[in-house]
């Protein structure tokens, strides 16, 4: 095991901490972690992340469920269309993506690099939204159509990029539905679990998985989520939201510059 992998295993703990503390961000860290520290293909890393984050989110959701820190209407109205689209995207669309994408007649881009650039831009957009918006104290009535449309988008991006969806679910619940951060975190974790299960169900081939790597990162992320859940009890929701936003911004810019300059 080289030094890069040792650092990667340490960062795996942060996957769980981010999930327990902020209800998302685990996949944001998992995909770059697998790609840059363990040299896993980005599309395979997107599948690995569903397993790692799904297991961690399941454990992380337990205390939120016990404390009733979740919002059922948002989970149902956003979660159902999300998991349906996750399956369609992961099973039917992802296998059709070519290795090389033609940007112009004489210029081709590697699909792995294009995926990571797209991934980074999503993080940056979500980051600015979370940093600028103040947390609401009461719920805002949102139409089923709005939540369903957001769920479809989240499902598509989850299936394509492999994220659990927390970095998109949290802004929608906090900014659109105006749900307090703690309830948004619990709701996000529950939706992430269902997205991960359906996304993995859509995968055709598990034989190529590096089971030892998955086990190590999963165990460390579970340790992290215990730490993150304990920390979340000591930090107020508004600070969590802004911290989450800055976290997304740093990760997004780091990945973007890495892929553009490579």
Image (spheres, rainbow, N blue to C red):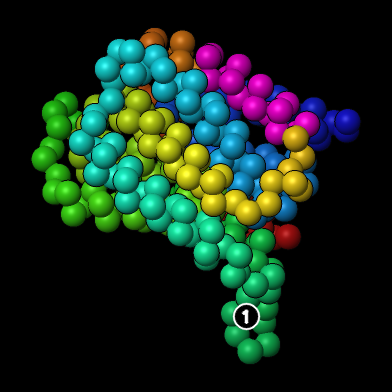
The image shows residue 87 at horizontal and vertical percentages of: 47, 53
Q: Which residue is mark 1?
A: 102
Q: Compared to 223, does 261 lie above or below?
A: below
The image shows residue 118 at horizontal and vertical percentages of: 53, 59
- Looking at the rendering, the stretch of residues picked out in magenta corresponds to 212-227
Q: Is residue 235 magenta?
A: no
Question: Residue 98 sits in which quadrant?
Answer: bottom right
The image shows residue 208 at horizontal and vertical percentages of: 76, 48
The residue that appears at 60% across and 33% down in the rendered structure is: 52
Q: Is residue 112 visible in this depiction of the protein?
A: yes
The image shows residue 202 at horizontal and vertical percentages of: 54, 51
The residue that appears at 68% across and 74% down in the rendered structure is: 100
Q: Quadrant of the N terminus?
A: top right
Query: As drawn, is 98 to the left or to the right of 76?
Result: right
Question: Residue 50 sits in which quadrant?
Answer: top right
Q: Is residue 126 visible in this depiction of the protein?
A: no
Q: Residue furthest bottom?
A: 105
The residue that appears at 41% across and 17% down in the rendered structure is: 62
Q: Residues within 10 Å of mark 1 (few under 14, many from 20)?
A: few
Q: Is residue 220 magenta?
A: yes
């Amino acid at each position: 095991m080289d030094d890069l992998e040792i650092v990667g295993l340490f960062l795996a703990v942060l996957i769980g901490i981010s999930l327990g503390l902020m209800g998302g961000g685990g996949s944001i860290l998992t995909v770059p972690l697998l790609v840059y520290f363990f040299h896993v293909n980005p599309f395979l890393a997107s599948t690995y992340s569903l397993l790692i984050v799904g297991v961690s989110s399941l454990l992380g959701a337990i205390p939120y469920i016990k404390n009733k820190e979740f919002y059922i209407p948002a989970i149902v109205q956003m979660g159902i269309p999300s998991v349906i689209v996750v399956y369609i995207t992961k099973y039917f669309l992802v296998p059709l993506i070519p290795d090389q994408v033609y940007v112009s007649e004489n210029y081709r881009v590697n699909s792995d690099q294009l995926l990571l650039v797209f991934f980074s831009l999503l993080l940056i957009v979500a980051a600015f939204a979370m940093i600028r918006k103040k947390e609401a104290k009461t719920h805002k009535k949102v139409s089923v159509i709005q939540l369903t449309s957001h769920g479809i988008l989240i499902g598509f991006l989850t299936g394509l990029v492999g994220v659990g969806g927390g970095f998109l679910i949290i802004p929608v619940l906090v900014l659109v539905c105006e749900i307090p951060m703690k309830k948004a975190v619990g709701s996000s974790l529950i939706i992430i679990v269902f997205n991960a299960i359906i996304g993995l169900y859509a995968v055709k081939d598990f034989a190529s998985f590096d089971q030892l790597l998955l086990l190590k990162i999963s165990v460390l992320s579970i340790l992290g989520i215990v730490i993150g859940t304990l920390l979340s009890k000591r930090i107020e929701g508004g600070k969590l939201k802004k911290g989450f936003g800055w976290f997304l911004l740093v990760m997004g810019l780091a990945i973007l510059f890495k892929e553009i300059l490579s």
